[in-house]
Amino acid sequence: MSNCKNDRAVCCILRQLGIYEDDFIFSFVEDKTLKGISLTKMEKEIKIIFSERVFLFRALGLLKERIDEKVFSLEEKSRFSMNGVMLDCSRNAVASIETLKDIIRQMALMGHNTLMIYTEDTYEVEGEPYFGYMRGRYSTEELQLIDGYAGEFGIELIPCIQTLGHMRQALKWNGVYGNITDSDGILLIGEENTYRFIESMIKACRKAFKSNRIHIGMDEAHFMGRGKYYDKHGDRKLTELFYEHLAVVNKICEKYGFKPMIWGDMPIRQAGCEGYTDSSVDISGLDLKLKMPDDINFIYWDYYSETEERCEEFILAHEKISNNIMFAGSAWRYLNFAPNLEQSFLSTHSALKMCLKHNIKEVFVTLWGDDGNEQSYFTPWPVVQLYAEYNFYDNVSEEHLAKRFNTCTGGIYEDFCTLEVLNYPGSIAKIKDQNPPRYLFYQDVLLGQYDYYVEAGYNSYYDECSKKLRKCEKRAGKYDYIFSSMAALCDVLAEKSELGVRLKKAYDAKNFEEMKNIAEVTIPSIIRNVRKFRDCFYIQWMHEAKIFGFEVMDVRFGGLMRRLSTATDRINAFLKGEITEIPELCEERLPYNGQKDEKAVLSANWLGIISTSF
Amino acid sequence: MYNRFKFSRIGVMLDCSRNGVMNLPTLKRWIDLIKDFGYNTLLLYLEDTYEIESRPYFGHLRGKYTQNELKEVDDYAFSKGIEVIPCIQTLAHIDTIFQWSEYKKICDCNDILLVGEEETYLLIDDMLKTLSKTFRSRCVNIGMDEAHMLGRGKYLDKNGHRKNSDLMLEHLSRISGLAKNYNFELTMWGDMFFRFLNNGKYYGKNTDVPKEIKDRIPDNVNLVYWDYYSLEKEHYDREIKAHKGVKDGIWFAGSLVSWNDFVPDNTFSIKACRSAISACAENGVSDIFFTIWGDDGAECSPFSLLPSLYFAACFAKGITDQNIIKKGFKENTGIDFDSYMLLDLPNTPNDDEPFIEFETYVADKYLFYNDCFLGKYDDTIREGDAAAYKLAAERLATVNTTPEYEYIFETISLLCKVLSIKTDIGMRTRKAYLKGNINALEQIVTDYSEMIKLTEKFYDSFCYRWMYENKPQGFEVQDVRIGGLIQRMKHCRKRLTAYLRGELSKIGELEEQVLSHNGTDASLTHEKATRDSFNWASVVTSNRL
């Protein structure tokens, strides 16, 4: 029998769950042969047997759910050997230490045993002052602290870095890294200095992490070998180049006691599948002869495929290359303020079912934050919960998921799902890779790049959303700042969504009264609401992340407010006769990027939303 | 200095593709002005800012000229005896169209068109057809400069490795053929021929273009030797000979330096033009023009370049006496020449005279956008820089201008006023914060307020400048930049205030050590950033914008 008072992590979780340790007699037994959890409650006696430490915390959560039952017992058999989360800390936002600790506790309750913090250049590397400069990089001490904290909960913290592409943030310092840059964020393969640099990164990871595994990235290096490499060495077969580079990096990893894993897209792309992320591409005829070395884990990542057949097809392709396949899915939180749970659930179900069928034992869910990390780290957590439940159950009902979510995160499942409805104003169909809240928020009122899709009723839709979210906010507890910020966004959209259409209509009809109203009433009101949203969003950001990177949000919000004022100025100038026309409003509203049959689209990056000039 | 060589063409090229598209009333005023100065050709640089029928996404929302507008400009210029020549792009520098999937198909990589693809030639034919309909001139500049990664993207995937010179010549031959259908004579920027020989560099050591390349340059194509960087006549002599060696009949393009910031560098431009023009005269290059580029947002008014615009015209006419030129300038513009030259000041306000060097600087822009807390460019700032901006603002404010050009001086004077506070406010903030000097921080908070007020004033003036000279499209980018800056200043002030009130225990940004902006040396060298070393996005953040 163990005394839980000596176990800081257990005490912490019990406190979080509101279970008083003195009310019960606990007995915790670790038994590796069990592969899961066995939990028994006999009045005050509670016995938990677990095969790995993190399951102890999951069991405590399960206990909490049935604490009022006098006697019960349950067993859960785990099917994955690794089940984890990857958190993006490189897209301007860098999660704060408190957030990471919070995430670790939630993961423990869920039973996730692995955390990866995606750090392109946001970790300290000795002798490289420009690496992560002014980006809020983690110091080695911070990482050690998190590593230790995760360890207390039985969670392995695995470094997740880049050693080929996606290095734009570091390599932009061309005075420092110019000589090891191939082109466009890609490291120059075959160069002594490149490997020295990679070695210092891996050495830094060794110092900060206890894990013997490392994720070395290597995805989407589309232009590998085409820049300085090409100048120096001419045309090379990309596959050879890739494997050569991998072999060298692998050796460095080995030297520091790391077993690497890499993203799987590059070898598959090189085998002929350019559209790794395009679910319509035919992958039956791929040339998959080259084998991945056995000591490297090969990650099949897929955030898009909606059917089991498609996932299976991809798994088979990856299996031809490697015997050590892992899977990474997605809790969609990039390029949008609101989560896309439907898409995430759909792809999770089909992918994890196929992983189980094909005996893929290691899976994790990614929380990417591309283009500025505008979404809370927590909004897509129902998906993270789903991953946890898949470890034990084939069919996870929504009811089950909701209950577990509430236990592990303290959030109300239904309310978190409400956040998603921001994606579906008007007749927009669910489950699509699209982001109306983002383009409706940022798009320019005068240029109306996305006005083609705007339907009557968007405004009132968001007005309703705001009301719903305000209700959620009241009962959201520690997550109230998320609902408050999303409600504030809806308040903007409740006037701004249809504004461009309304303005153009008034302009075309020479309805000066309406134009005056827009300039004097509507736009000032929108600006006030943007400011409110900005303030709420700042609170959200500071709740979860370091301050660095928020300067980008200042530019985005400040730019939008300034731009709205300009719209007022120009309407007024027109009404006063100082200008004879507003040329922006004379332009035809084309569908975005020629997509004329869609109800909504996935917009460009931020700058592309506000302008077609850069 | 040189014999009175008669240039057959003296032109000026306006950049209408870097967000700023000059509006028609202003363009007509510009035509009147260059006519008075003695120019006979106007070149319009149009990447995607002209209307092509049935291609609505070409220049979509970019303020592109309609065909009727271009005809109107051509008619007007014709009535003044000015030839209008379109300068387009048919190889690289056409990235704005690649944001649309319709054109992404014919993108090789970066900003480069996919050579050898039929779809590409359909587009180029549409371009030429449009120009043929809208302009009287039978001359078109087809661009083709700086296509550094030619053949390395989709082309390489599809066709394997090919020599880039072969690719370009094949491409050129196709375009030359298309142009013949419209009786177009073509000019193209000449750099690629030399880049092939010098590891991508222009003006390199190797100038001996192989015969098999020379022989393949079509007869209806002439090279434009362009050079914006040198003050040495010998350099121009050498390069002219090199270009002539490739194919005789070259044109020369110099520069009235204006790209990447708010203010001109007339001083450098005049010296460079003088050397270039005399080299052209001595070597018998009879078609010359001067470019006014607007890279990174067209923030500099073309009208701020009148001193060098006038000087260049005078040189080309054989007038070299400074006093005569200055007198003529005053007669033409109503403003004293030396006063007009003060617009250069914000580049180098705190430099010893003469500040002309071999590099042109753009301190005004990176200091304006340098973040108060992150201080990426703090290392460039020297003692006295802020005070020098104060002085510059005063000097600019007292210039005896005319109603026509008053707004230009006002804008730049206001910019200097902002910089008189903003230049070192970040350094002062950091210093006071690290020393725990609360009194100093309290004082600095009031400076933030004053700076914000001045920036708003500058914005108003800049907005007026833009709308007066340009079409409104493209200004949305300026709204974002300046609006973003103001919001950021307010945020920094708010964080400072919160810190002073004890609501914030620390300001993490200010605890970071500032490194040098270019990464050459972690110690602070006070070295200025050079004109081409940055853009707006890289100044405001170390993150991804």
Image: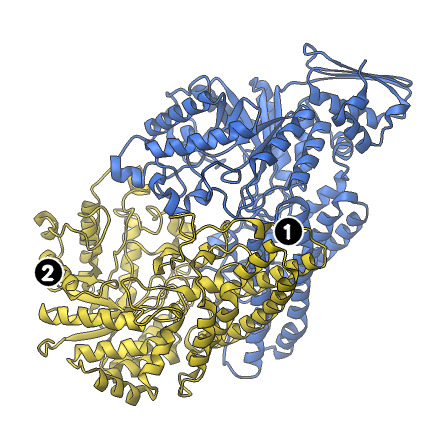
Rendered shade, chain B: yellow
Q: Nearer the viewer, residue B414 or A298?
A: B414
Q: Position of residue A376 (x, y in %)?
A: 65, 45
Circle 1 sits on which residue? Answer: A427
Instruction: Name the chain letter of the residue that bears numbered label 2.
Output: B
Q: Quadrant of residue A114?
A: top right
Query: Which residue shows up at 72% across the image and 55% down it?
Result: B503
A557 w.r.t. B156: above or below: below
Q: Nearer the viewer, mark 2 or mark 1?
A: 2
Where is B536 relative to A402, above or below?
below
Q: Name the chain letter of the residue that bears numbered label 1.
A: A
Instruction: Please tell me whether mark 2 sits on a helix, a strand or a loop.
Output: helix
Q: Chain A's shade in the image?
A: blue
Name the amino acid, label 2: Lys
Residue at disc 1, secondary structure: loop
Q: Is residue A66 left or right of residue A595?
A: right
Q: Share a chain, discs 2 and 1?
A: no
Q: Residues within 10 Å of mark 2 (few under 14, many from 20)?
A: some
Please give left or right for residue A545 compared with residue B241 in the image: right
| Image vertical order of residue B355 relative to residue A344, above or below | below
- Determine which of the numbered discs, if any, sits on residue A253 in the image: none
Residue A331 image-quadrant placement: top right
What label sits on residue B241 in the rendered view? Answer: 2
- In the rendered view of the protein, which quadrant contains the C terminus of chain A? bottom left
Q: CA distance from mark 2 to mark 1?
A: 66 Å
Tell me which amino acid carries mark 1: Ser
